[in-house]
Image (tube, rainbow, N blue to C red):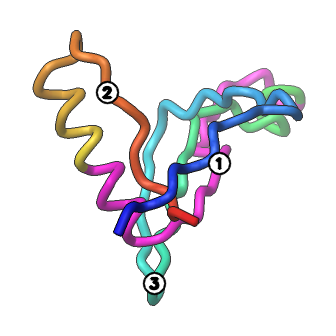
Amino acid sequence: MVEPEQSPPSDPENVPEILCDGQFNVTITGPVATLTFTHMRPDPMALFRDGKIDLKAIVRARIVTSMNNLIALRDVLNRIIQDPSTPVPPAGGTKH
């Protein structure tokens, strides 16, 4: 049996990149995983009221995906970490 090809990706809404260089977490709930990413930002109240920089880990993105995609992400990351110069093809996704 031949598996059908996946649809090519498109970005009609030009989704922006978001800097997330803080803590992250992965939560598994049944068949899905939620990846939560943060970034350190100054608390605006302390900054404007007191002129103090009080950094807080602010949630910037949450991605909910299937366990199969989480496993595919792990495999892609392992390949990239082992050999950063080798291009890695897209992975994961449901085949329709």
Furthest toward the bottom, the residue is 30
Amino acid at dot 1? Ala
- Mark 3 residue element: loop
Furthest toward the top, the residue is 85
Tell me the residue at 67%/30% (across/down): 18
Tell me the residue at 51%/62% (across/down): 95
Q: Relative to residue 20, is residue 25 depicted above or below?
A: below
**Residue situated in front as seen by the camera: 46 or 11:** 11
- Mark 2 residue element: loop
Does the stretch in magenta take in 73? yes
On residue 88, which mark appears?
A: 2
Q: Relative to residue 37, is residue 47 depicted above or below?
A: above
Residue that mark 1 sits on: 61
Badge 2 or badge 1: first in the primary sequence: 1
Q: Which residues are magenta?
A: 49-74
Residue that mark 3 sits on: 31
State the CA–CA distance, disc 1 to disc 3.
Answer: 20 Å
State which quarter of the image contains the N terminus. Answer: bottom left
Answer few, some or many: residues within 10 Å of disc 3's Cα (few below 14, many 20 plus, some between 14 and 19).
few
